[in-house]
Image (cartoon, coloured by chain):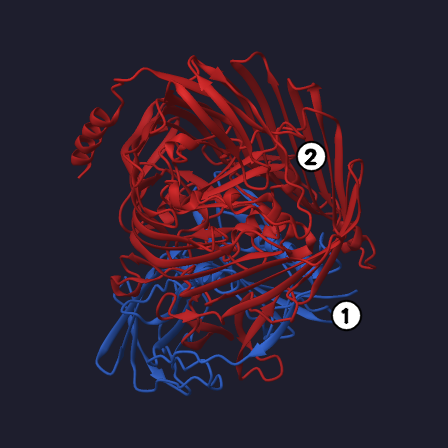
Chain colours: A red, B blue
């Protein structure tokens, strides 16, 4: 299979890589926002004379088109911006930077139909969801804190991992099977405050793209999805300040030029003050409690010259939870990325990134003896990406990525002689190289194909155990520091075809393999900050997913409405589950607690979106199934994974009432999670013990909820803007089950009852936002 | 214990913060075929020792567990001594001659309706309670009961703590293990509860008597109670505790040493 793939790809590369008969001339440049100077990602330039064919800008707003010399009319456009048209006499290479003015989103303005794009039909994007930052602004979420991760959960194929959770499941995958990148750095825990907030401050974010399993070859390392989040670069024209004051959090963003038109910076900070409410409590334990988080995004960029540009970006966030001096836990991510864009020629774009990422938690206990436990996962990486634009019909991307992972599962320090050993650190080196080629055959048929070769090595030092099928250590080997314990090589082919039926509809198909070498060990329903990441090892094999998908895309009413239907089937290997009663926390032999099995997931995703007008929004429906199979569980047959939900519906509507008021509402419905409820009970030493039979044979009650929101623009001038946002989460107060527990009836201990816990009913919130 | 405290605290703070609401709901749960539940202890104290055999019932019926009265129950040790237990009442079977001895391995054989279930348990060395005292909880206003013991060095030791408040056995399973190379005093603290329904801390009153049993248990019994303690709550895939009895019987068979101490609450 793999060998055949290699042959096919080699043949494709040889035949499709351009042999240029005609001398081509290149027009290249950047597309930016005229007001702020922000690069516009995914903006398009199209050539009228080539029946609208053209190119899109890359992640840095750069485009390059190579055409036979001649006269052309070139149009640059981007959703929400006024398009620009230029006449071009192309005889020698030209550089054109387009500065597009944001379209004043004033009421009742008729959008000229020719400006409506059918990118979803013509582009090779499949299983991809992009979010408009505008949508995030308007969609109501809990506590009024607009949130990227909450908003993507309203899109097809992406499901919330639980009430208020920022964890999400993509096409039946687990929460840890999502690659979350913030300016190329991996974010290992995207949750604040047990998941009720995500770590992404939406004020600092420019672009969000989710790839649902068939990501381009430059992404890798997780089975289910890649969520690529890019931070704003900052306004390079003038200083700007914006912020918001809310019920439980406030935020402030400052941005401005370092040197006008040459470089800019942005700093965005956020802090919650939920613990201020605890201070009001009369309980002396509670009013000394700490409960807050903060985060800080910062980024700067500078154009050295026309060919070189550097970026420095960072994120720092922390959650603090504590009870006086006796107990405290805090956790947080920090990431840093240094990037260098270089144009080797106007057709060869290069980006070099140095990336560092750290996730850690720390527990402090002081009950006479001061004790603290620190756990970390640290990444240091080098990433090199090249893009070669060889014509209007061919783009080649290739590069490599090398990451050193250092995992400190638990290091203990104590003020006195406490007999607790720190756990052995784990070191791993992950290398990958990729190549992918996007090729347009003609007006109807295009494809992107490529492959990623990944090598993952577990390194010493330390004792490495081999476990038998019952979890008993068979054998121990000591490896020195830097010695290779185990290396896994994997080839991950990826291919997507697009067949454009006409300007309104297309058919796409894709296949992709993904491999995952870092695994999150967690057996709790909600996920904890103390959940541990472990590398693939002599016991734990890389997780592998193969996904095939097909889709039909149709736009109607002049691209006013977009419709898509996608189906997928995914086969999963080397999935991880836990032995009964597994001891996952602070266990040197945590690998002995694991079970390995397989899985499959399949489904249908329907999506209808109205993109323009006073009223816009979308409707999303998923019909899906995701199952696992493990030896010894449910007689070795397939059973539904916890996140298996047959039906999942999201409806999002936004309505601009007048120039001052806009309203929004979302409604979600989903089948309850697959769970294990008791089938009986018995008594041990006076305690009622539940009897369990089949794994995940039951269902939580179906979940549904309506959220409503409103934005009131108090003042809007070019100098100062202010607005209020109001929201009501769970507007009709549905008592959704967060957990169901089984216990003795308090009134009558001879009976047992099921108790449902509901977290949120009618959560109102408001915040004041300003910008100057 | 430390982990439990962390979890408890987290849940407490989050619960207060979110002021969630709870209610009893009706669920249509699957039923199950009644299964055998065996529970037996052999102590290093004089007998008789009891083995109780009952059956499980469905979740939605009253918690009255049908006793099994027609079983053949034999406990033997590795020196060849065997004792056939006789049925008294309610599925309880008692020994007549057997005496628990430290270091011996005991085998339980139960035959019910022609089906055989067996279990083995070894009685470890005994460890005594050095002292037993009350201590103010570092969290909140509760009171902890603390026992100090001298752990035996050089091997993994497993302990189970059972306590009674005014002669009523508290529900819940407390086990812990220690593995050190030094002779070392170790402390174990717990919050006394007698509330059979909720495991919620209960305020002690002056004159309340707390009786503590410290059992030294073997690994199989430790695994049983450790896994029994982890089920429910936030566990994503609850399962039955890992029993040391064969052939799918639920419950445990425990040959252990036991040391007892008593303390009266004065405040």
Q: Between tags 2 and 1, which lies in front?
A: 2
Measured Cα–Cα span from mark 2 to mark 1: 57 Å
Question: In front: A530, or A258?
Answer: A258
Position of A417 with respect to A683 (left or right) is: right
Residue B143: x and y in percent read 71, 60
Position of B119 with respect to A555 (left or right) is: left
Residue B183: x and y in percent read 52, 41
Q: Quadrant of the N terminus of chain B?
A: bottom right
Q: Is residue A205 above or below residue A262?
A: below
Q: Badge 1 is on which residue?
A: B206
Residue B105: x and y in percent read 32, 60
Position of A353 with respect to A766 (left or right) is: left
Q: Secondary structure at mark 2?
A: strand
Q: Badge 2 is on which residue?
A: A268
Say whether marks 2 and 1 touch (CB < 8 Å): no
Q: Residues within 10 Å of mark 2 (few under 14, many from 20)?
A: many
Letter of the chain that mark 2 sits on in the rendering: A
Residue at 39%, 78% (x, y): give it.
B30
Q: Is residue A393 above or below residue A688?
A: above
Letter of the chain that mark 1 sits on in the rendering: B
Corner quadrant of residue A302 = top right
């Amino acid at each position: 299979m793999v060998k055949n793939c290699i042959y096919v790809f080699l043949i494709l590369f040889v035949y499709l890589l351009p042999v240029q008969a005609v001398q081509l001339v290149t027009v290249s440049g950047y597309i930016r926002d005229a007001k702020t100077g922000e690069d516009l990602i995914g903006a398009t330039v199209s050539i009228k004379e080539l029946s609208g064919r053209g190119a899109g800008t890359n992640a840095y707003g750069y485009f390059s088109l190579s055409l036979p010399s001649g006269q052309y009319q070139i149009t640059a456009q981007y959703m929400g911006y006024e398009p620009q048209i230029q006449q071009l006499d192309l005889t020698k290479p030209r550089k054109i930077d387009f500065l597009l003015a944001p379209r004043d989103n004033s009421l009742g303005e008729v959008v000229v139909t020719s400006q409506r794009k059918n990118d979803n039909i013509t582009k090779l994007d499949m299983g991809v969801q992009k979010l408009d930052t505008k949508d995030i602004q308007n969609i109501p979420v809990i506590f009024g804190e607009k949130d990227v991760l909450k908003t993507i959960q309203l899109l097809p194929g992406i499901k919330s991992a639980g009430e208020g959770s920022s964890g999400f499941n993509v096409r039946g995958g687990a929460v840890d099977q999502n690659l979350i990148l913030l300016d190329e750095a991996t974010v290992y825990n995207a949750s604040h405050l047990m998941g009720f907030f995500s770590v992404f401050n939406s004020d600092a974010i420019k672009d969000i793209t989710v790839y649902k399993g068939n990501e381009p070859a430059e992404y890798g390392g997780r089975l289910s999805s890649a969520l690529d989040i890019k931070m704003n670069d900052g306004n390079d024209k003038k200083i700007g300040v914006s912020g918001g004051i809310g019920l439980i959090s406030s935020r402030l963003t400052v941005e401005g030029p370092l040197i006008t038109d040459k470089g800019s910076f942005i700093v965005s900070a956020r802090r919650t003050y939920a613990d201020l409410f605890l201070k009001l409590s009369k309980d002396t334990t509670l009013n000394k409690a700490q409960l807050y988080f903060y985060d800080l995004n910062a980024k700067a960029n500078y154009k050295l010259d026309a060919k070189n540009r550097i970026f420095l970006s960072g994120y720092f966030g922390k959650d603090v939870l504590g009870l006086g001096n006796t107990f405290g836990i805090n956790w947080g991510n920090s990431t840093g990325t240094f990037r260098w864009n270089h144009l080797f020629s106007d057709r060869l774009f290069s980006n070099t990134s140095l990336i560092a990422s750290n996730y850690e938690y720390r527990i402090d206990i002081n009950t006479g003896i001061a004790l603290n436990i620190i756990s970390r996962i640290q990444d240091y990486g080098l990433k090199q990406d090249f893009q070669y634009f060889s014509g209007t019909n061919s783009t080649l991307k290739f590069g490599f990525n090398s990451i050193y992972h250092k995992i400190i599962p638990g290091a203990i320090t104590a003020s006195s002689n406490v007999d607790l050993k720190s756990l052995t650190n784990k070191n791993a080196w992950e290398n990958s190289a990729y190549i992918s080629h996007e090729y347009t055959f003609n007006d109807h048929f295009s494809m992107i194909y490529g492959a990623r070769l990944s090598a993952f090595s577990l390194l010493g030092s330390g004792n490495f155990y081999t476990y038998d099928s019952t979890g008993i250590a068979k054998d121990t080997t000591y490896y020195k520091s830097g010695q290779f314990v185990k290396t896994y090589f994997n080839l991950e082919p990826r291919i997507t075809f697009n067949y454009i039926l006409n300007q309104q509809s297309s058919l796409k198909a894709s296949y992709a393999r993904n491999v995952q070498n870092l695994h999150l060990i967690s057996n709790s329903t909600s996920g904890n900050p103390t959940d541990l990441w472990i590398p693939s090892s002599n016991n734990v094999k890389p997780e592998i997913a193969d996904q095939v998908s097909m889709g039909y895309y149709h736009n109607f009413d002049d691209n006013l409405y977009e419709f898509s239907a996608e189906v997928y089937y995914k086969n999963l290997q080397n999935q991880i589950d836990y032995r009964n009663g597994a001891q996952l926390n602070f266990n040197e032999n945590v690998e002995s607690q694991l079970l390995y099995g397989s899985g499959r997931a399949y489904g249908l995703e329907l999506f209808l979106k109205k993109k323009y007008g006073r009223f816009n929004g979308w409707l999303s429906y998923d019909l899906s199934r995701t199952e696992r199979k493990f030896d010894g569980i449910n007689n070795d047959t397939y059973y539904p994974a916890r996140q298996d939900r047959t039906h999942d519906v999201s409806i999002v509507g936004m309505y601009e009432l007048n120039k001052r008021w806009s309203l929004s509402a979302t409604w979600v419905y989903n089948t309850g999670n697959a769970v294990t409820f008791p089938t009986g009970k018995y008594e041990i030493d006076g305690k009622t013990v539940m009897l369990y039979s089949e794994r995940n044979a039951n269902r939580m009650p179906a979940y549904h909820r309506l959220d409503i929101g409103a934005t009131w623009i108090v003042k809007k001038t070019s100098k100062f803007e202010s607005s209020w946002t109001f929201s009501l989460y769970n507007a009709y107060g549905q008592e959704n089950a967060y957990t169901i527990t089984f216990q003795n009836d308090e009134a009558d201990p001879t009976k047992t009852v099921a108790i449902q816990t509901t977290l949120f009913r009618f959560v109102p919130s408001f915040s004041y936002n300003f910008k100057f | 214990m430390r982990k439990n405290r962390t979890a408890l605290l987290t849940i407490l703070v989050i619960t207060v913060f979110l002021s969630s609401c709870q209610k009893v709901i009706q669920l249509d749960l699957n039923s199950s075929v009644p299964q055998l539940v065996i529970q037996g202890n052999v102590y290093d104290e004089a007998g008789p020792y009891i083995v109780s055999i009952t059956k499980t019932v469905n979740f939605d019926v009253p918690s009255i567990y049908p006793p099994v009265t027609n079983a053949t129950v034999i406990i033997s040790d590795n020196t060849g001594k065997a004792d056939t237990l006789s049925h008294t009442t309610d599925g309880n079977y008692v020994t007549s001659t057997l005496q628990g001895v430290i270091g011996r391995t005991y085998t339980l054989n139960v035959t019910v309706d022609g089906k055989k279930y067996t279990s083995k348990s070894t009685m470890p060395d005994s460890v005594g309670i050095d002292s037993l005292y009350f201590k103010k909880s570092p969290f909140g206003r509760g009171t902890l009961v603390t026992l100090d013991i001298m752990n035996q060095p050089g091997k993994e030791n497993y302990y189970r703590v059972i306590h009674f408040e005014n002669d009523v056995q508290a529900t819940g399973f407390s086990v812990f293990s220690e593995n050190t190379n030094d002779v070392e005093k170790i402390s174990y603290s717990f919050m006394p509860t007698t509330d059979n329904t909720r495991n919620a801390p209960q305020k002690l009153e002056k004159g309340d008597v707390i009786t503590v049993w410290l059992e030294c248990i073997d690994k199989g019994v430790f695994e049983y109670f450790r896994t029994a303690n982890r089920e429910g709550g936030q566990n994503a895939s609850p399962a039955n505790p890992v029993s040391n009895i064969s052939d799918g019987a639920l419950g445990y068979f425990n040959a252990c040493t036991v040391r007892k101490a008593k303390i009266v609450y004065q405040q």
